Amino acid sequence: MSRIAEKFKELKRRRTRGFIPYITAGDPDIETTESLILEMEKSGADILELGVPFSDPMADGPVIQRASERALRHGIGARDCLELVRRVRKHSDIPIVLFSYLNPLLALGLDQVGSELVHAGIDGVLATDLVPEEAAEFLGTMRDSSIDTVFLASPTSPDKRLRLIAGASSGFLYVLSRTGVTGIREDLSATAGDLVRRVKKFTDLPVAVGFGVSTPEHVRQVCVHADAAVVGSRIVSEIAAANGDSELLSRVGLLARQLAEAAHEPQ
């Protein structure tokens, strides 16, 4: 059983939900990212999404776009992300999902990417621009290496496509709370709960909800229906605001604890 599956099994046993933060590798620098991962775990994160900086992040809003730009200015690429996770694995067993676009992964070599991820200590991969209809070869490589594959389900996806997405996913399935790009929102879309219920007709996998989840109250709303809440832009925004501040880790850690406590409230 993968670390991701073990974590969701543990959450189910505790009758609670999961908190999944997203951060961009190399923002503000790679050393701070390593410290942030450990701080997130200490603050209650159950699984971590680690973003690979990319020059054309089509699915990301301005907050994460700027984080990618900052990381790219430091020359951070996919191999740097793998080396980062190798270092983290000396201190932590937190499940880590590599959140990427397909090109940086293919740059590792399609015949080698699975073993590269395994040897680094990656548990799962979410390739944002990879659709299940075109994923057979990539999925085969990941399955051979026991790497979980997480796919995105959108509110506009018909049931036929949700079935396809569910069949291609392992570890968990990621439901978008709304259409569009990532970003901080004041209000959460009411469609997320309906989509979670639709998805669960086609899979027994845990379902996480993200895109626009920004506050502890949003996390509570998500966790009424879903098995986990993903928070990205809000955390990345806090990292950017605290850059250069000696209290960066404690500031981000406090935010993570507030979000984690909301997810971990008994259901």
Image: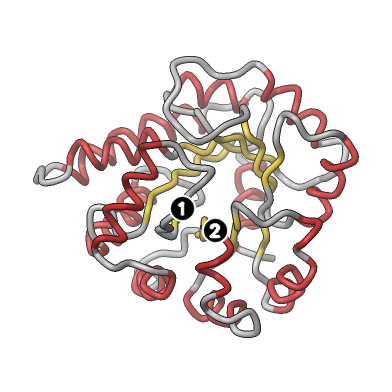
Instruction: Give the number of the disc on residue 56.
Output: 1
Q: Which residue is mark 2?
A: 101
Which of labels 2 and 1 is toward the front? Answer: 1
Q: Earlier in the sequence, mark 2 or mark 1?
A: 1
Q: Look at 47% across and 76% down and name the residue there.
A: 120
Q: Look at 58% across and 63% down and name the residue there.
A: 102
The location of residue 160, given as percent across then percent down, is 90, 40
User: Does residue 51 appear left or right of residue 241 in this picture?
Assistant: right
Please tell me whether mark 1 sits on a helix, a strand or a loop. loop
- 3D distance between C-alphas at marks 2 and 1: 9 Å
The location of residue 257, given as percent across then percent down, is 35, 35
Residue type indicated by callout 2: Tyr
User: Does residue 153 appear left or right of residue 35 in this picture?
Assistant: right
The location of residue 87, given as percent across then percent down, is 34, 73
Q: Quadrant of the N terminus?
A: bottom right
Most foreground residue, 151 or 17:
151
Residue type indicated by callout 1: Asp
Q: Residues within 10 Å of mark 1 (few under 14, many from 20)?
A: few
